Image: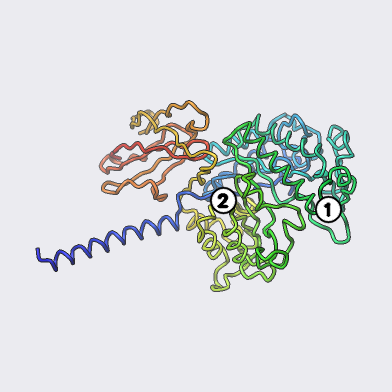
Amino acid sequence: MSIKSFLHRGVTMTVVVWMAVLAVAQVNTMHPKREFRAAWIQAVNGQFMGVPEQTMKKQLIGQLNSLQGAGINAIIFQVRPEADALYASKIEPWSRFLTGRQGVAPSPLWDPMAWMIEECHKRGMEFHAWINPYRVKTSSRTQLAPEHIYNRHPEWFVAYGDQLFFDPGLPESRKHIVDVVSDIVERYDVDAIHMDDYFYPYPKQGQEFNDNISFYYYGGGFSNKGDWRRSNVNILIKKIHEAVREIKPWVKFGVSPFGIYRNDSSDPLGSRTRGLQNYDDLYADVLLWAREGWIDYNIPQIYWHVGHPVADYEVLVKWWARHAEGRPLFIGQSVSNTVEHADPNNPNSNQLPIKMKWQRSFQTIGGSCQWPASAVVENLGSYRTQLVSAYHKYPALPPVFSFMDKDAPGKVKKLKPVWTADGYILFWTAPKYTDEMQRAVQYVIYRFEAGQRVNIDDATKIVKVTRNTFYKLPYDNGKKKYTYVVTALDRLHNESKIVKKSIKL
């Protein structure tokens, strides 16, 4: 072979290799293997109020099946709207958003949170227990149950506008909220505790949140009430994180704050926006929580559209991406806002494509959460259709929280196909473990055609994520050869080494 031919062949091989690399990179960008894909299911809209058990279960099964089909891998379910419970709490009364009247248990008795955890896990979804920390009444007309904590300790609370709140400045308030969280984590197999954007109440013009008494008793060392208020919330966040870690070190604690941290008019490091501010108006110092490791993930609610004159989606996504502060960052997406506005560069399209482009443009952003889940289920503006056909076309595993745990479980054992009365089944046994953190709780099944390189970073090869230790094979005529790969996932989605088996189907 001449030198010229050799060099030409070398260049050709280099081009082929680079084309293969680019093809894999494109697949990983369009169909990432790791991505947080969540949806919020709310209770305060009254969708469950007074609904019989079987009707509510049927309604939720329909929502979960639809969301699973849309690629959602985590459900954030509201379980504590008004210092009450959509679960069998030992501390707070049953919620009126479940039975229609606070303190009245469902009849026959059942536990919606326990049931939802089971249904989510059955579908390979995480379950995040969503609580509102301070709110007690959304309206002054709300009747509190006799056993509600307010009726025992009215001095812990502050009326503001038409609502009622725990006073965040009181140690007793913080202890009660931490006790509620601890009770949930101890008794339920939740994957995370989740708080939304309601810390100190959203300000009402001309009204002051009257915490003067608690400031008098507990504000020593603070000349500025705003700094004291932020400190109060900081203490609660830190205490909740410590409590969760101590009880179950695999359970995450995340928040979903209002979408603006600070405007650049208040702080040169703030975003180029002109809206309400977490730091100044809600006294939520979200960046500090992330920096100090008091939260495990952050989902700012960036509910505006691209091009919004006060709070531009693109501006805010870029700002939060630069200020993830070393913690997993996901984007809170408004379904209705997204489909109701056209892409500024493509008037024939809604804004989902451009929002997904920005979301996936930064390594610090690991996914998103859809508000509300019902809008996805209803396919508002063909939103669900777009997720299914493009952005969530293939399954994705939630991101690994390596700062919590980075040790993978052992690999599966005894992988083999077996003919049964129910068909051709791929069986395996769970790996052994000595620590709950490394226990296998899920399995990922990949399929590769004959001649294809086994590459488990390619999400298009995932055929199933399951809690079962078996998978029914799609047998046809036994003439086509495939390689099946099975891996194990622990509670924090660390993935084991592969075990593979060649099978003719």
How many marks can you see?
Answer: 2
Check the image and tell me how it is coloured. rainbow
Q: Quadrant of the N terminus?
A: bottom left
Question: Helix, strand or loop at disc 1?
Answer: loop
Closest to the observer: 159 or 327? 327
Residue linked to disc 2? 326
- Residue 440: x percent and y percent? 47, 32
- Residue 439: x percent and y percent? 49, 31
Tag 2: residue type?
Answer: Gly
Q: Quadrant of residue 48?
A: top right
**Label 1 Cα neighbours within 10 Å, binned few <14 / some 14-19 / many ≥20:** few
Q: Residue 243, relative to residue 71: is it above or below?
A: above
Residue 272 seen in the figure: yes
Q: Residue 52, relative to residue 346: is it above or below?
A: above
Q: Residue at point 34% right, 30% down?
A: 418
Q: Quadrant of residue 294?
A: top right
Q: Look at discs 2 and 1 and give the one toward the viewer.
A: 1
- Residue 395: x percent and y percent? 47, 48
Q: Is residue 133 left or right of residue 342?
A: right
Residue linked to disc 1? 223
Closest to the observer: 9 or 502? 9
Q: Residue at point 61% right, 40% down?
A: 192
| C-alpha span from label 2 to label 1 | 31 Å
Q: Residue 307, relative to residue 94: is it above or below?
A: below
Q: Quadrant of the C terminus?
A: top left
Closest to the observer: 60 or 186? 186
- Residue 6: x percent and y percent? 15, 64
Does the residue at mark 2 contact the one at mark 1 (Cβ under 8 Å)? no
